[in-house]
Image (cartoon, rainbow, N blue to C red):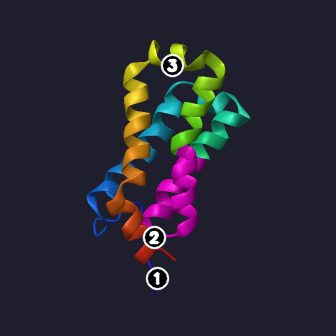
Amino acid sequence: MESRRWMNTSQPQTLQIAVFLLYIDAVFIVLYGGLASLFGIALIAGSVAAGFGISNELKWGYGLGIAMAILPFLLNVARNGIAGVLGGDLIGLMFQVALVALLLHPQSREYQRIWFK
């Protein structure tokens, strides 16, 4: 019997933290009014689905996780320009960069390449 899980403690620490950050990102989108728009709902659903997919070692979850990590940064650059991003919410930027770095870390990529279906 196959079990589904929200967190997978057998994965490398880089993937565990990335999954946690994806879930936290979804919570912050909800707290800051993301449920008021279809785009916000899509970001919430994408972040939760990516975390769930990575926890269950699914390739689509890893790809969606990378997309959900990069998308907010690209949208912020498109809206404010690179100077606006660097002069704006630096803590949010740090979390975005950390999430991308965790997912693209060699340990995460190697684990994903070997074990994900």
Q: Earlier in the sequence, mark 3 or mark 2?
A: 2
Q: Give the residue number, with chain letter if any, for mark 1.
A: 2
Q: Judging from the image, what secondary structure is the residue with disc 2 in?
A: loop
Q: Could you tell me if residue 21 is visible in this image?
A: no
Rendered residue at 56%/58% (across/down): 63
Q: Give the residue number, with chain letter if any, for mark 2.
A: 57
Q: Judging from the image, what secondary structure is the residue with disc 3 in?
A: helix
Q: Are marks 1 and 3 in contact (CB under 8 Å)?
A: no
* Residue 58 picture location, percent across and down: 52, 70
Q: Earlier in the sequence, mark 1 or mark 2?
A: 1
Judge by depth and name the residue closer to the eye, 52 or 94.
94
- Answer with the quarter of the image where residue 16 lies: bottom left
Q: Is residue 81 magenta?
A: no
Of the residues tagged 1 and 3, which is closer to the observer? 3
Judge by depth and name the residue closer to the eye, 89 or 33.
89
Judge by depth and name the residue closer to the eye, 90 or 37.
90
Q: Which residues are magenta?
A: 46-68
Rendered residue at 35%/59% (across/down): 106
Q: Give the residue number, with chain letter if any, for mark 3.
A: 85
In what quadrant of the picture does the N terminus appear? Answer: bottom left
